[in-house]
Image (tube, coloured by chain):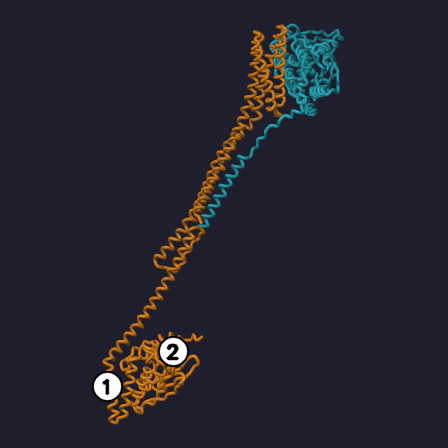
Chain colours: A orange, B cyan
Amino acid sequence: MNSVRRKILILTSVTVVMMLVIWFSFTIYNRQTQEQYNEILQRYLLLNEVNVASQQLITDLNLYLSTSDPDQYQKIDQIKDSLREKEADVWSLGYQENEFEIVNYVHLTDSLIETVDRSISLHLQEDTEAAANEFNDATRIANYISDTTLALVDKELKTYDSFYRHIIEQSVNINQLGVWLFLFLSFILIVLTYLIARSITRPIYQLTEAANQLSQGHFDTEVHVDSNDEMAFLAKTFNRMRLNINNLISEIQLKAQLEKELQESKLLLQESQLRSLQSQINPHFLFNTLNTISKKAYLEGSIETSDLLVDVAGLLRYNLKQLDRSVTLYDEVTVLRHYIDIQKARLTDRLQFTESIDFDLLDLDMPALTLQPIIENAVIHAIEPRESGGKIMFRVSDLEDQVLIEIEDDGPGMTEEKKIQLIEGLLIPKEGHSTGIGFTNVIKRLRIFYGSNDLVKIDSQINRGTKVSLILPKQKGGTRNV
Amino acid sequence: MRKNVIAFIIFLFVILGYFTITSLARVVRSDWQEPLPINQADQKYRLVLITQDIDTPFWESVIEGAKEQAEKDQAMLEVLGNYGSNEEAFLQNLELAIHSKVDGIIIQGLDTDEFKELTKIKAAFYSIPIITIAIDVPMEESLRRTYVGSNHYESGVKLAEQLVEDMGEVGKVVLFYDQEQYFYQLERQAGIESVLKKYPEITIVPVETIDQKEDITSTTQDLLNQHPDVDGFIAIKSTIALGMIEEISRRRQVESLAIYTFDDHDDLEQLLIDGKLDAVIKQSPQEMGRLSVQLVIEWLNGETVPLDFDGYLTEIELVKATDFDE
């Protein structure tokens, strides 16, 4: 974290440290040079001081000899002391080239002091002439000191000549170094600044680009940022947001699909309810009337008609009562038989119905009015169009976990295309069904009831017949029979 | 494009870095070497060689020899000299050396009271040994330790004998003296006279002059006027010989005259080649320089105490004009 700040801090501190180092080294160098200058100057000053002091000594001696002032004597003593001190310093000025002069210089100073001492002691002994002689000597020695001072300065200039030139050259070099250093560091800083700036702005640019993409609705392009700082963090968050949005969208799409399906089944339900309402026009009245007619026919000895009327009434009652609740296979088979009886009465010999039922399976739960529409289909498509009639076979057999119900006819069959349409529920049911419930309706209800899709199978061949197989699980809820 | 830019940046970096580093190296590097300090514990002997005629080949040779020996003995030798026989500067140098308390003084002798006073009193006061070189001053007058140089009496004898040999035993010879009458000149004079006295046929015309060009010229003119029949000249000093020959050559043929002198001088050799000068006494200056330094150091080390008061004589050689003929 704080990577951008760290980058900026590093850049700043590198700059500051560089400047400090340069400033320090230049300051140190300047101080060294200054020290050198001072040392050189001090050499000259020292020589001059000795010279001045020796001249002063002569002046004071002269005064003393003429006035015998004890103050003057004190003064001479002081100068002598300072000269002796300076002698030690003068030694430090020596090097091999000027050794001879330096030694001479020191000895001359000694000689001067000695001569002055002698002059004073002679003066105290009142030997004025001898004192004056010594004074003359001292004067000459002082002059020699002056000469030697000049000679030393001369030597100094000669010896240090190359050094002075060196100093001048160095200052030129320092200036050059300054210029080069300035160029070099400026260059480095510019490059460094550019790199750091780019490492900050490039991720921002990439992020902007990604945001642009997102805003235009391209949720699939991944957000990628070449960085390891906050920008990378931002990019990661951005990416996660993109994924979340993607997930949400697909969730919404799924929900919408479900909603649509629900709507469809609701419509289906409404339709069938409407139909049933239509046919409910006073069903009890119709039902009672049918029963009355049945009894009347029975009393009049028309037993067949009475039976037929009972079948119709049974069918009607089943139809009215049991559409939206589960029934057993037994109920379904009973209704089926009523229907077959009615159709037999209508079609007489043209309809041959055979059944084979495993009676152990009759308590299977299933939706009401499942089998009757399929049989009716068989009657409508396989029996009615043909003069000679046809066969319908109904079988219920055990398949361990499932129950297999087959309705087979020997009718004209159907094309593969139609078969698929039928299973997919794309065929619009035509009017003409006695119960108003078509094959498609059956399939849908079965699917909803069992929560499974592979329940209906159709085998059909043109001019050979059609077999509809229902494979219903014994346990409701499909294959999860643990 | 990007590659080019990177290459350019690296190139710039290298170039700038190179110049920065080289200029840094120039600043840091220092050719200058601090002069070596004096070794105070190991003090060498400080010797001084003082002369009046530092620019003559004679003294150059003396200095050369002395310096060689000083280097061999690891002594410091300083030459104090002045040009053109400036006596005052010469004495000042001597006094300076004495007051500087050098360990030994090798000096061209000067036959004056000031010189004697300095050597006798001042140098003795500081107990500095003095050796005279090339030109002697009597020991009693200067308190010198010894003398290193030619035997001037002997060289006078040699020159006079050569004169007699060249000129014959009959003739008129001019002896050109220096008015100052230095000790070494007196020696030479004595040597010459001791030879010429043996030949009564040879007339000696003694002439005195001041060692200044105008004086030499006028003295020569007078001499030639008074004695037009002179056969030979002996100049006691080379500078006199030079002025004299110049003046004579203005008046007459020089080659026929027998002219002799002492010492070396730059111009003497050419005169010898031209035949204007017949013979010169040549000394051994280098040997003088060498020996004098050696003797001072021996004395200081206490190896040869005392030094031979009579002096250490170096070789003298007679160089004739005929030697250049071949």
Chain containing mark 1 = A
Give the amino acid type for the residue marked by disc 1 in the picture: Thr
Position of B256 with respect to A73 (left or right) is: right
Q: How many marks?
A: 2
- The CA span between labels 1 and 2 is 39 Å
- Residue B279 visible in the picture: no
Q: Quadrant of residue A216?
A: bottom left
- Residue B141 visible in the picture: yes
Q: In which quarter of the image is residue B259?
A: top right
Q: Which residue is denoted by mark 2 in the rendering?
A: A455
A23 or B216, nearer to the observer: A23
Give the amino acid type for the residue marked by disc 2 in the picture: Leu
The C terminus of chain B: image quadrant: top right
Note whether B167 is above or below B293 in the view shown. Answer: above
Taking the spot 26% from the left edge, 76% from the top edge, the residue there is A274
B302 or A375, nearer to the observer: A375
Position of A285 with respect to A1 (left or right) is: left
Picture coordinates of residue B249, whole percent (x, y) = 63, 13
Does label 1 or label 2 sit earlier along the sequence? 1
Q: Which residue is denoted by mark 1 in the rendering?
A: A289
Neighbourhood count class around disc 2 (C-alpha, 10 Å): few under 14, some 14–19, many 20 upward: some
Taking the spot 55% from the left edge, 28% from the top edge, the residue there is A163
